[in-house]
Image (spheres, rainbow, N blue to C red):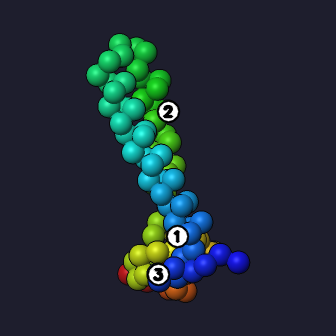
Amino acid sequence: MPTALSDGRNLSEIMEDVSRIEARLFLVAFGMQARRTLKPEVAQPLLDYIDKRLKELSQVAICEICNVGEITEEHCKLVCPNCGHARDCSDP
């Protein structure tokens, strides 16, 4: 059984967060290098792919209450699996 840390997450959850952050940083750095060093016609397909992957990685929403849980969508509700906070589609 994984050991829970002080914020309620276990080590594997934290490592998943770190992996997502590392992926974003790598993509941003790689894109910057491609812009500087490659001809535009060579770089553009690569930059398009990088933009697509960054958008996919950025779609993860973190709970505004506990700042830990990744928000999941359940019908018309956004729910934090960590603290249980939920927002309804009728909430402002």
Residue extending furthest toward the right: 1
Which x, y percent locates residue 18? 48, 57
Q: Which residue is mark 2?
A: 49
Q: Quadrant of residue 81?
A: bottom right
Say whether marks 2 and 3 touch (CB < 8 Å): no
**Of marks 2 and 1, which one's residue comes earlier in the chain?**
2
User: Could you give the CA–CA distance between mark 2 and mark 3, rounded to whole angstroms?
Assistant: 35 Å
Q: Nearer the viewer, residue 42 or 16?
A: 16
Q: Which residue is mark 3?
A: 7
- Residue at image position (36%, 36%) is 29
Q: Amino acid at mark 3?
A: Asp
Pointer 1 local density, CA inside 10 Å: few below 14, some 14–19, many at least 20: some
Q: Amino acid at mark 2?
A: Tyr
- Residue at image position (51%, 49%) is 56
Q: Is residue 87 visible?
A: no
> In the image, is 66 to the left or to the right of 35?
right
Check residue 29 in the rendering and tell me which mark sits there, or answer none: none
Quadrant in which the N terminus is drawn: bottom right
Q: Amino acid at mark 1?
A: Glu
Q: Nearer the viewer, residue 28 or 22?
A: 22
Pointer 2 local density, CA inside 10 Å: few below 14, some 14–19, many at least 20: few
Against 84, residue 48 (above or below) is above
Q: Which residue is mark 1?
A: 70
